[in-house]
Image: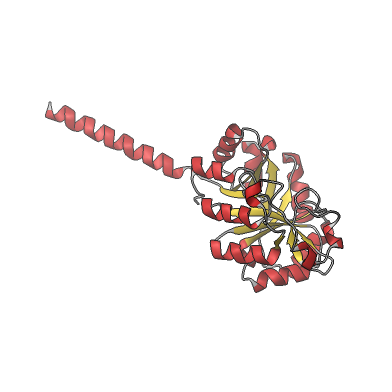
Amino acid sequence: MRKLVYILSIIILLGTGCSRQQKVSVKIPMTSAHRGASAIAPENTMASVDSCIKYGVGNMECDVCISKDSVFYVLHDSTLDRTTNGTGDISNWMSADIDTLDAGSWFAPEFAGQRVLRFADLLQRAKEGGLRITIDYRNGGLQEMLSLIRSKGMLENCNFTFSKEEDIRRFRELAPEVKTLQAYIRSESDIERVVREVNPDIAVVWIDSLTPQFVEKCRNHGLQILALVLGADDKTEDNQKAVDLGVDIIATDRPEQFIMKYGKANP
């Protein structure tokens, strides 16, 4: 009888050990908060940045554009109309006037007084809070933007996305040491062309397009993978697919929900 109990105990211990080992081996991707934690705070404001830091989000995606007097701001649209009480193109506004605008009331009354976020202030808060930044560059002097990032000691903690090929070439010239250039890849058949023309470090792919074969081919080219899982609808299945495929980063509009379910990223 004692021998039977001993054998059963060994089996249970082994099963528990295997279960723990399997759990640890699951790769959890880094979360990239689309425009910040934009479902619980107004997008691209300091409130959305602070929410990212609060929930331990690894990365925040933002769009960087410039004012009339060459101050860099974080704003998705080229115009101020949708997310502020200003109107017109931000490039026609002076920074002193932009800084008076309300960028939070449109979202909820409790966010009244949130300002259009200066890029320099975002970099500083991100550095203090251990938050990486993904920069979707829109306009302004690229060299000046990189100088600002360097002055804040954040160059190694930023990813970069560009829509224009000339900006990509310029970026490679100005910051050859940076290995976090992102590029959109629409399909598996498009990988070779993008690698040849852009030579990115990170493949940005919509989750619907990703397959195990797609992932393997990206890995064969030395690419990290960022899965786009964007939208306000239920993303339970898409989130699980991203985890199962072992992507490196997941871009989401609900980073706090992803982290509450899966936890923070692990290697």
Q: Residue at x 64, y 51 (%)?
A: 111
Q: Residue at x 78, y 53 (%)?
A: 85
Please tell me which residue lies in front, 139 or 52: 52
Image coords of residue 198 (percent x, y): 77, 55
Q: Residue furthest left?
A: 2
Q: On the rendered structure, is 169 left or right of 205?
A: right
Name the residue at 75% across, 55% down: 75
Q: Could you say where residue 56 lies in the image, as x and y percent from the top left?
A: 52, 52
Residue 72: percent from left, percent from top: 75, 65
Q: Is residue 127 left or right of residue 84?
A: left
Tell me how many marks there are: 0
Query: Percent x, y for residue 78?
Result: 82, 54
Nearest the eye: 249 or 56: 56
Does any portion of residue 191 appear in the rendered image?
Answer: yes
Is residue 33 among what the camera can see?
no
Q: Quadrant of the N terminus?
A: top left
